[in-house]
Amino acid sequence: MSSSLPPLSLSILGVEPLDEFIKEIADFIHHMIMSRPDIPGNVEVEAKIGLIRERGGGRLLLPVLVETILTPDSIDCRFESNMTAVRLKKALCKRPLTSLTRLYMKKAQHKHFNTLLNKLKISSSQPGYASSSPLDYHHLYLVDTFYASETNDREKIRVTRDEKTGNVLECMKKIRLGDLNVYSPKRMADWRVSVNLEVPVSHPVGSSTHTRKKDRMSYAHEEFNIDLTQVTSTNSSNTPEILHELEVEIARPALLLSTAAKRGDMNASEHERNAFDELIRAFVNNARILVRNASDSWH
Amino acid sequence: MSSSLPPLSLSILGVEPLDEFIKEIADFIHHMIMSRPDIPGNVEVEAKIGLIRERGGGRLLLPVLVETILTPDSIDCRFESNMTAVRLKKALCKRPLTSLTRLYMKKAQHKHFNTLLNKLKISSSQPGYASSSPLDYHHLYLVDTFYASETNDREKIRVTRDEKTGNVLECMKKIRLGDLNVYSPKRMADWRVSVNLEVPVSHPVGSSTHTRKKDRMSYAHEEFNIDLTQVTSTNSSNTPEILHELEVEIARPALLLSTAAKRGDMNASEHERNAFDELIRAFVNNARILVRNASDSWH
């Protein structure tokens, strides 16, 4: 009798307790949305994969065993949304780096995620694939040019063009609303949730401060975009710097705002009332899957 | 179209990512079991509700927003499995404490959990109650007498008697295998998972070192016991000290060991292979529900 486990309830209450981690992220994003400045624009919610670094030092180390959310402004650290750094850190322990090795590694990690997402795109498009919806894919070549804002020193205006045609796709000012850092000691990378307000503006005059070329593989899945981007930055000194970024973002700002407005509203239907938390749950799940796949490949 | 959320997959992979927190606790307990000393005895796995305190100070504070598992031996702290302390800490901010207030509060918190578990016992026994199995209940009056071990200074021998009849119920030596502390900044209490080996021994001779009276309300639910205990300790100085303890433990050590032995065994059936992790999931869920109910009542 004692050797086999009888069917178990999830708990004494018969239910799984609420996921405190996902609730905290949902509360944070909801608060940022509801308390945002009254300026017309799109709210952007994204999770970037990278490293939380101590100011001027290596990766942050806290005495905890599993992922947790850092209290904002409690630790002197910065978030580096560059996956190259993650890979380099590991590799540095093993051998000296040559320029060729660096280049190889950048290509290797880019290729790793590209392969992973491409595989998923193919398998999710097979007839009879039941676990999830198909992924859509676009390869984008973009150029961002930045200008100082005339009204606020800390804000920049970004003009995005199609690299091939030169057509202006977007002209906007990004206002940072808030960030939450997620420390992930079991993985090779941490992540950060950012909430921004993107305000459309007219094309700036004057000269630009710097330029970024973006070679972006963009995968669309249901309400999310997963972007794998190689960024080549050029500043006034003309020294190009190459970064690799991986991020997941909520695809439709209008949906985000409408679900946020009805969160917990007892006059709305149960589906509408819970839609915001459902959206954030899938968003967090996707970020976790990305950061864990980074780990699997790089251990 | 954009105002209503279409049905969402759980993630790009169509599944919920593994719960890192529960996996860590399961790995820890499994490791403690598989590497235990080769002495016949029962493995006890329990979660106690209490406070993680800095050595000689107040409750531990870490710069994180949600529950996480502390790295063992990384912080100079101790775990206090006394719920009175939790309640007192909150109350201290509001008003000076008299002996009468203290007594009232001890009774109040004891009563709170007693009421909560009794309600659950009654509702779970109603015909048609679908969420979970019925709770069983016993009120136990026990006396523990402790003796020094002849073979090891650090080990104690515990003799447990029925307070009314004086009959010896158990004579055993408890060997601590390991603990994990769970820091829970959103709640009024933290918790600790302990794994011990309980070895039956013959009744010791000589005089005892101290005595504890236990007034225990024990609720049994499926594979778990939830014990709400008022402990009155008397040491050689004859000053009685009253503590209140709340803990959940895995009820059947034999089941625990048999599921642990088959964890991940590809020759076992899928049900057997996953039984250990299922058992630990329900155990963690129950501990979380207890610590969160403490919070709801005491905020």
Image (cartoon, coloured by chain):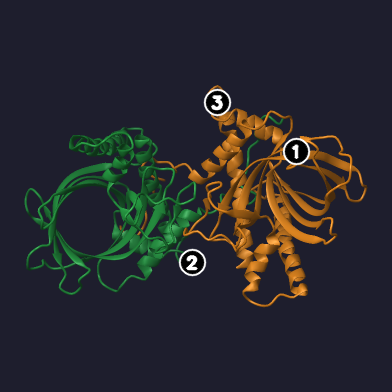
Chain colours: A green, B orange
Q: Quadrant of the N terminus of chain B?
A: bottom left
* Residue at mark 2 to residue at mark 3: CA–CA distance: 48 Å
Q: Which three-letter amino acid code belongs to the residue tagged 3?
A: Asp
- Residue A95 on image: x %, y %: 29, 34
- Residue shown at 8%/55% (left/top)? A167
> Which image quarter holds the C terminus of chain B?
bottom right
Tell me residue A216's x, y (percent).
20, 46
Q: CA distance from mark 1 to mark 3?
A: 37 Å
Dot 2: element: loop
Whether discs 2 and 3 lie on one chain: the answer is no
Alpha-carbon span between mark 1 and mark 2: 62 Å
Residue bearing mark 2: A266
The three-letter amino acid code for the residue at tag 1 is Asn
The type of residue carrying mark 2 is Met
Residue A123 point in image, percent of width and height = 32, 33
**Which residue does the numbered mark 3 point to in the structure image?**
B265
* Disc 1 versus disc 2: nearer the observer: 1
The residue that disc 1 covers is B152
Disc 2 crowd rating (10 Å Cα; few below 14, some 14-19, many 20+) is few
Residue B205 occupies quadrant: top right
- Name the residue at the right extreme: B165
Q: Are marks 1 and 3 on the same chain?
A: yes
| Residue A272 in view | no
Q: Chain of mark 1?
A: B
Q: Nearer the viewer, residue A219 or A60?
A: A60
Could you tell me which secondary element the residue under label 3 belongs to?
loop
Is residue A205 toward the left or the right of residue B250 in the image? left
Tag 2 subunit: A
